[in-house]
Amino acid sequence: MTALSVCMIVKNEEDVIARCLDCIKDIADEIIIVDTGSSDTTKEIVKKYTDHLYDFKWVDDFAAARNFSFSKATKDYIMWLDADDVIDEKNQQALLALKKSLNPSIDVIKMKYDVAFDGNNHPTFSYYRERIFKRSLHFTWVGEIHEVISPRGNIMHCEIAIAHKKLRPNEPERNLKIFEQMILQGKQLDPRQQYYYARELYYNGKTQRAVDQFLQFLLEGKGWVENNISACQTLAYCYYQMNDEDRAVASLFNTFKYDTPRAEICCDIGKHFLDRTAYQMAIFWYGLASEIKMDDQNDGFIMPDCYGFTPYLQLCVCYDRLGNRVMAESFNEKAGEIKPNNPIYLQNKDYFRNQH
């Protein structure tokens, strides 16, 4: 059986750390915890699970902390987790099975990362992340913020999912402050960092600066295709906030320069026309979204509801507005086949029942 080290960096995680460690304690052969300055009871809780607890002085560099945690691992493979990650029973069993059956020729394992959920705990935002690495190949984290390991060698995608379940938001502007400190120190941001810096500007309400940064990122033309598409999409959201609808929808169409249409983008374009009562145009774009097959192994950001459920609900709305109740009801039923307990589907069902 493959031996597995699980490595984590933590700070003031007393509300979630036990939840995470309970998920992994019967799977990991070794748990490495690196504390970057907790002032709560995090370290006391950790000591109940492992003796491998280390202190690391925080230097505004997530990659440095993660690399320190990896340096303490001794097993065949290394897996990383965040303190607010959760592995449900089904995925715990799948991870145990993977340990037993893993071909030693595998160098990197990518797993699903579910980071947002609906009221029934179904993922609404997911992507693949490099999760497990062969220790002998000495993989290294890079990037002070939004750190990453560039996979190499024999890479395996698996359906095991890690759920990111935050109980509280991150420190306001934490990531943005790290980026701006890097810039102040004269560091040249690479394309990936440019993209994430623009996103942090957007998340922190600095819309015009976000627009400028996204445009610069796209103009230089060095970004990964998925980041290019996401940049155009978020740039559109910036323009909507600035009441520049023409540039907003043009930015959504610009995504088609980089690859075939994503359902997420088609839904955004559909919403643009639905909000402006251009129902036939909206029907076209939501219809296209409903036909696109999800490719969740391209490692880009995925909103699963855009591949069926959301387009069906919005097609229901469009046809209802046009007075075509038969088509409207049929699309609501298609949505219900995907999420039979969804409150919007059920409300629509009651609405149509009252129309008869």
Image (cartoon, grey):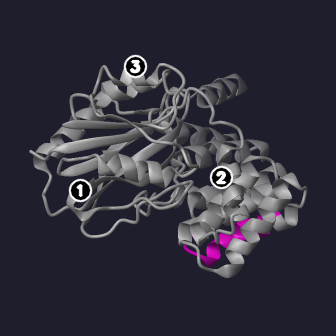
Question: Which stretch is magenta?
Answer: 248-260
Query: How many numbered discs?
Result: 3
Tag 1 residue:
135
Image side of residue 63 versus residue 318, left or right: left
| Front-lying residue, 37 or 176 | 37
Quadrant in which the C terminus is drawn? top right
Q: Amino acid at mark 1?
A: Arg
Percent coordinates x, y for residue 236 in the rendering:
76, 60
Classify 254 as above or below 237: below
Using the numbered discs, state the Cα–Cα distance from disc 2 to disc 3 in whole angstroms: 29 Å
Using the numbered discs, state the Cα–Cα distance from disc 3 to disc 1 in whole angstroms: 28 Å
Crowd around label 1: few <14 · some 14–19 · many ≥20 (10 Å): many
| Front-lying residue, 332 or 64 | 64
Tag 3 residue:
44
Residue at left 43%, top 60%?
Answer: 295
Percent coordinates x, y for residue 246 in the rendering:
86, 66
Which quadrant holds residue 138? bottom left
Tag 2 residue:
178
Q: Amino acid at mark 2?
A: Ile
Percent coordinates x, y for residue 175 in the rendering:
65, 48
Percent coordinates x, y for residue 12 in the rendering:
53, 28
Q: Secondary structure at mark 1?
A: helix
Using the numbered discs, state the Cα–Cα distance from disc 2 to disc 1 in whole angstroms: 29 Å
If you read the primary sequence from the N terminus, does the residue marked by circle 2 or circle 3 appear first? 3
Q: Secondary structure at mark 2?
A: helix
